[in-house]
Amino acid sequence: MSSLSLPARRQVLADLVPGTLVRDLALVAGGAVLTGAAAQLVIPLPGTPVPMTGQTFAALLVGATLGMRRGAASLLLYLLVGAAGVPWFQGGTSGLSGASAGYIVGFVFAGALVGTLARRGGDRTPLRTAGTMVLGNVAIYAFGVPWLMAVTGFDLATAFDKGVTPFLVGDVLKTVVAAGVLPLAWAAVSRFRKED
């Protein structure tokens, strides 16, 4: 009789940095700052109240590189500090109001999901990384679209049309980049370890 088992718990890239609590605090803060910096890359899209930014890509990379706990903590820090008034949401905004706030809430859950999958090897090959990033994007949309509906009064079809469809090409590009970068990072780590 066979049983279905999950792959063993593995390291994420952040685990390769020596240290403990201080390292973890620095990584959590660094992930939040990276996401805030990426949020300043704003491309307004016609027909939607939600602009395209680099923060989604940063949030998914933070989750994959830091793992579930640190990734979720980093993105929660990003959310809380921005909600408290630090202007590091899209284009230098702050506060949890407006059409984009639900996506920011979704980053926390996406970071946890992507971090969990990365611990299971979801960032080691291009195909696994692509699947991990797609699931992370779905988690972001799962929070962003209902929030968009609540704020704008859009029905589901309109919210999907304005809050998901315009971003799909960008999501594909971000997924392709991640599917190249993360496995290459692990290949470099593997080569470095063999040389030691």
Image (cartoon, grey):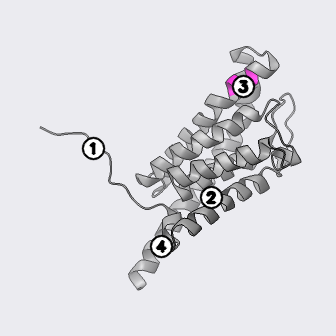
Q: Which amino acid type is marked by label 4?
A: Val
Q: Secondary structure at mark 1?
A: loop
Q: Which residue is mark 2?
A: 28
Closer to viewer: mark 2 or mark 3: 2
Determine whether 136 is above or below 196 in the image: above
Residue at the (73%, 13%) spot, across then down: 155
Q: CA distance from mark 2 to mark 1?
A: 30 Å
What secondary structure prevails in the magenta region? helix
N-term-proximal mark, 2 vs 3: 2
Q: Is residue 162 visible?
A: yes
Determine whether 195 is above or below 174 in the image: below
N-term-proximal mark, 4 vs 3: 3
Q: Position of residue 97 (x, y in %)?
A: 82, 31
Q: Which amino acid type is marked by label 3?
A: Trp
Closer to viewer: mark 4 or mark 3: 3
Tell me the quarter of the picture where residue 80 sits: top right
N-term-proximal mark, 1 vs 4: 1
Q: Which residue is mark 4?
A: 189
Q: Which range of residues does the magenta coloring cover?
A: 145-149
Other-residue count near label 4 (Cα within 10 Å), few / some / many at <14 / 14–19 / ≥20: some
Asked if residue 87 lies left or right of residue 194, the reply is: right
Q: CA distance from mark 2 to mark 3?
A: 26 Å
Kindly identify which numbered label has been placed on residue 5: 1
Labels 1 & 4 near each other (Cβ < 8 A): no
Asked if the stretch drawn in magenta spans residue 147, the answer is yes
Closer to viewer: mark 2 or mark 4: 2
Asked if the stretch drawn in magenta spans residue 186, the answer is no
Q: Quadrant of the C terminus?
A: bottom left
Q: Is residue 127 visible?
A: no
Labels 1 & 3 near each other (Cβ < 8 A): no
Q: Which residue is mark 3?
A: 147
Kindly identify which numbered label has been placed on residue 83: none
